[in-house]
Image (cartoon, helix red, strand yellow):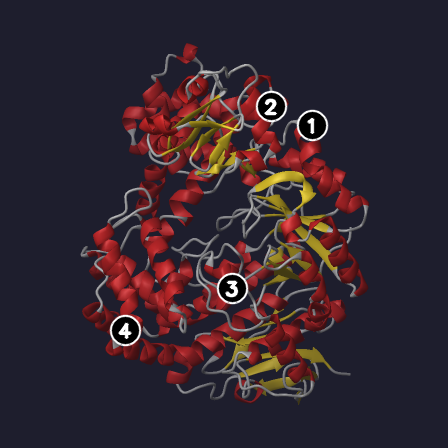
């Protein structure tokens, strides 16, 4: 199996095609990258900038460069010695525009008789033999249907007509009643939809790749890439939505000739992938959480909890576990009610269990799930514990839960299979997309894949986790930023300094809330942290983030019934950053307080991530400082010309100050080149201890095996370090004569003062010197 040393994620779209990516391969090679990592490239909904709404799995998207573009990229990558990792989407297809998706169009046209009735996950009986399509403004809008060009139209929406269902003189409403689909008001999707979706996205319809021919047809183009040597590995999007992730991975491994595979899977703390999964690991959110917490000051937890309580006007800070039970229940009873009710319909009538109580009990079990899903029999004990917790807290449901337990643990039954597909939906929408916008004491902690109740990680704990990672999943990806992170790595690095600056944070928050009040205390904390982390940023970016954060949180406004008065207050607060000099001055002063330490965190976290066990990924553009916020902000166009020029200057001998963003480029390029060109220096993992007054402020490790290898030294909690007098007498013991790849300085074996080692940058990357 060909495996990557490192990857670089590129967002391929009409504005940045595969041909343009091919032109970057020389730069990526020079940066030190080993594989190019592509966002989805199969044909997607027209205008999609992410590609996860695939409409035609048989072609490379022409707007993204087409088959010719992939061939050009693969050729250019090969000439530079680079591999190619491609992102694929097996769980669902885009159906927003039926005419663009031949599978969906045929399904709507022919209904149950269609070949594709087996491909999509439709509960036909519940819909009375029809697929419910929630596109109408309301059910009354059926009066707005038109007949045109042999199709049924609703404004810009077009739908096919089944053969023999239209005669001269028929009304659009009559024709509509004869179709294999029913157009319904969009609000009915919450409880009455009868096809599986991706989460709660009505325009992404679930695909049944467990059916052999569906796998074959939806993967024919992907298999071609491997047969023709165009692609070397795959990133599998959302495997938790599949009926049989283990079986899918086994079949994919075989179809690709044993290629390198990664799954986009969120692991909760302590959770591992099943050993039966044929893949090399995850896309790295678990690593992201470990790295972030190295740079959070544990001493701040009590103070930030106190502030959180005051912002909520409560005697105590938010109880996260109670919060996520509530937010998950909100989702299960709201936008994913359709999925819960479908589960309830799978309980045999012979069980004599009341249907509504069954739905209530199923939702309650899901809301007690501590992980995204089980893969029965793997994880059965977690399911049983969730059932027990549900019974403990809802004793009136105990008998129903006892009746459900054997059905939920029966691996041969449809209820157990579909329950496992559903629990992750509720977790993602209830936790990532709701609670993470409500639990706001420190934004760094509420990142995808993290448990925000784990406030900080000590170097000792970090070393234990990295030792396990090296032993168990050395080819799993590590990352700090992705197209799904809610804040980029550099925004989080700056926000983490708040844990060392609680008085300054309270003063800043009080000042801006007095001058430009956001009338929702926890949301105010979230928004002002994000603004500080992203600053400088333009008005439209910050307005978009604030509105999305408020609606996702769902406390003061929401997506379906927005509170326009609250949203005007929110927009005015963001505008004040640009229009009210006192607010702008307060922000500038606060960012200046955080900035040097945020930069230290940024460089330290990046060097740790690039050199720790695993396959490091660099998200496009983040070799410079990047203050992006949640999507679509993190998919903005990257100025590669500036990065190419800056790297050329570094290679020509320029020495950046560590406060400049080019210093990050120095760290990234030197670490990546070293990993690629000297893999023998990265075969093991050993902690390196420091001694002295500031020993707690350093994290260091040796990646050698029997002999010393590459040594990483990074600064943590830099503001407290400066406040307490700097490194003073602190030393680190070097096992051999070493050279710093960042500065060129050399050091003899033995104790070295950290004040000397880290004089120029807050990090050092040392290699043995004969």
Please determine whether, in this image, residue 537 is positioned above or below residue 420. below
Q: Which mark is residue 579?
A: 4
The residue labelled by disc 2 is 118
Using the image as rendered, state which of residue 206 and residue 383 is in the foreground: 206
Choose mark 1 or mark 3, whichever is in front: 1
Give the Cα separation between the discs numbered 1 and 4. Answer: 59 Å
Using the image as rendered, state which of residue 113 and residue 733 is in the foreground: 113
Q: Which mark is residue 213?
A: 1
Is the residue under label 2 in contact with that under label 1 (CB below 8 Å)? yes
Is the residue under label 3 in contact with that under label 4 (CB below 8 Å)? no
Choose mark 4 or mark 3, whichever is in front: 4
Please determine whether, in this image, residue 664 is positioned above or below residue 185. below
Count residues near mark 2 (Cα–Cα under 10 Å), then give few for <14, some for 14-19, many for 20+.
Answer: some
**Which residue, as the protein is rendered here, is positioned at the far top?**
350
Which tag, 2 or 3, sits closer to the chain's start? Answer: 2
Residue 394: horizontal and vertical position, in percent?
29, 30
Residue 126: horizontal and vertical position, in percent?
44, 19
Give the Cα separation between the discs numbered 2 and 4. Answer: 57 Å
Using the image as rendered, state which of residue 541 and residue 735 is in the foreground: 541
The residue labelled by disc 3 is 291
Mark 4 secondary-structure assignment: helix
Whether residue 334 is visible, yes or no, is yes
Mark 1 secondary-structure assignment: helix
Mark 3 secondary-structure assignment: helix
Count residues near mark 1 (Cα–Cα under 10 Å), then give few for <14, some for 14-19, many for 20+.
Answer: few
For image coordinates 50% across by 54% down, the residue present is 484
Give the Cα separation between the discs numbered 1 and 2. Answer: 10 Å
For image coordinates 59% across by 35% down, the residue present is 101
């Amino acid at each position: 199996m060909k495996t990557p040393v490192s990857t670089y994620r590129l967002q391929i779209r009409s504005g940045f095609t595969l041909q343009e990516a091919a032109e970057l391969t020389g730069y990526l090679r020079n940066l030190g990258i080993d594989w190019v990592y592509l966002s989805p490239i199969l044909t997607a909904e027209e205008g999609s900038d992410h590609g996860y709404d695939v409409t035609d799995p048989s072609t490379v998207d022409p707007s993204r460069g087409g088959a010719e573009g992939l061939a050009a990229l693969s050729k250019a990558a090969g000439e530079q010695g680079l591999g190619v990792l491609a992102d694929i989407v097996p769980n669902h297809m885009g159906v927003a525009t039926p005419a663009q998706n031949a599978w969906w169009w045929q399904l709507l046209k022919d209904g149950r008789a269609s070949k594709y009735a087996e491909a999509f996950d439709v509960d036909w009986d519940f819909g009375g033999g029809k697929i419910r399509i929630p596109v109408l403004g309301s059910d009354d809008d059926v009066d707005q249907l038109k007949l045109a060009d042999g199709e049924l139209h609703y404004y810009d929406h077009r739908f096919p007509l089944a053969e023999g269902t239209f005669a001269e003189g028929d009304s659009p409403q009559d024709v509509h009643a004869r179709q294999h689909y029913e157009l319904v008001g969009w609000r009915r999707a919450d409880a009455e939809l009868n096809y599986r979706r991706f989460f709660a996205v009505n325009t992404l319809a679930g695909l049944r790749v467990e059916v052999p021919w569906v796998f074959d047809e939806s993967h024919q183009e992907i298999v071609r890439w491997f047969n023709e040597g165009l692609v070397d590995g795959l990133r599998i999007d959302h495997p938790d939505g599949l009926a049989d992730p283990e079986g899918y991975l086994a079949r994919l491994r075989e179809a690709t000739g044993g290629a390198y595979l990664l799954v986009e899977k969120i692991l909760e703390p302590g959770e591992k992938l099943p050993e039966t999964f044929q893949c090399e690991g995850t896309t790295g959110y678990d690593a992201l959480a470990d790295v972030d917490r190295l740079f959070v000051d544990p001493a701040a937890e009590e103070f930030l909890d106190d502030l959180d309580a005051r912002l909520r006007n409560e005697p105590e800070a938010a109880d996260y576990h109670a919060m996520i039970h509530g937010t998950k229940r909100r989702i299960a009873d709201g936008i994913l009610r359709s999925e819960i009710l479908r589960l309830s319909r799978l309980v045999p009538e012979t069980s004599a269990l009341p249907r509504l109580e069954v739905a209530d009990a199923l939702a309650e079990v899901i809301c007690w799930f501590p992980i995204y899903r089980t893969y029965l029999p793997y994880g059965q004990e977690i399911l049983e514990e969730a059932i027990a917790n549900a019974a403990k807290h809802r004793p009136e449901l105990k008998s129903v839960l006892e009746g459900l337990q054997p059905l939920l643990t029966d691996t041969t039954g449809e209820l157990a299979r579909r329950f496992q597909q559903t629990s992750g939906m509720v977790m993602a929408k209830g936790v990532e997309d709701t609670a993470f916008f409500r639990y706001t004491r420190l934004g760094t902690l509420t990142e995808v894949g993290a448990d925000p109740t784990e406030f900080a990680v000590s170097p000792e704990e970090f070393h234990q986790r990295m030792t396990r990672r090296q032993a168990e999943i050395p080819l799993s990806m590590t990352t700090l930023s992705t197209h799904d992170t809610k804040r980029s790595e550099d925004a989080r690095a700056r926000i983490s300094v708040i844990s060392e600056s609680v008085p300054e944070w309270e003063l800043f928050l009080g000042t801006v809330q007095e001058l430009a009040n956001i009338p929702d205390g926890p949301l105010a904390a979230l928004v002002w942290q994000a603004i500080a982390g992203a600053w400088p940023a333009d008005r439209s970016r910050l307005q978009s983030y604030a509105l999305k954060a408020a609606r996702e949180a769902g406390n003061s406004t929401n997506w379906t019934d927005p509170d326009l008065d609250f949203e005007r207050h929110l927009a005015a607060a963001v505008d004040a950053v640009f229009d009210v000099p006192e607010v702008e001055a307060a922000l500038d002063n606060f960012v200046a307080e955080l900035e040097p330490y945020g930069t230290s965190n940024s460089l330290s976290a990046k060097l740790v991530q690039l050199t720790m066990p695993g396959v490091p990924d660099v998200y496009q553009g983040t070799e410079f400082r990047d203050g992006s916020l949640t999507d679509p902000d993190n998919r903005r166009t990257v100025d590669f010309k500036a990065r190419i020029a800056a790297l050329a200057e570094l290679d020509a001998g320029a020495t950046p100050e560590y406060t400049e963003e080019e210093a990050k480029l120095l760290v990234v390029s030197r670490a990546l080149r070293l990993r690629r060109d000297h893999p023998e220096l990265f075969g093991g993992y050993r902690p390196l201890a420091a001694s002295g007054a500031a020993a707690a402020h350093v994290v260091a490790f040796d990646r050698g095996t029997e002999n010393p290898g590459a040594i990483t030294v990074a600064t943590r909690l830099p503001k407290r370090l400066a406040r307490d007098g700097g490194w003073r007498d602190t030393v680190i013991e070097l096992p051999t004569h070493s050279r710093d790849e960042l500065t060129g300085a050399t050091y003899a074996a033995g104790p070295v003062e950290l004040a000397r080692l880290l004089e120029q940058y807050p990090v050092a990357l040392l290699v043995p010197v004969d």
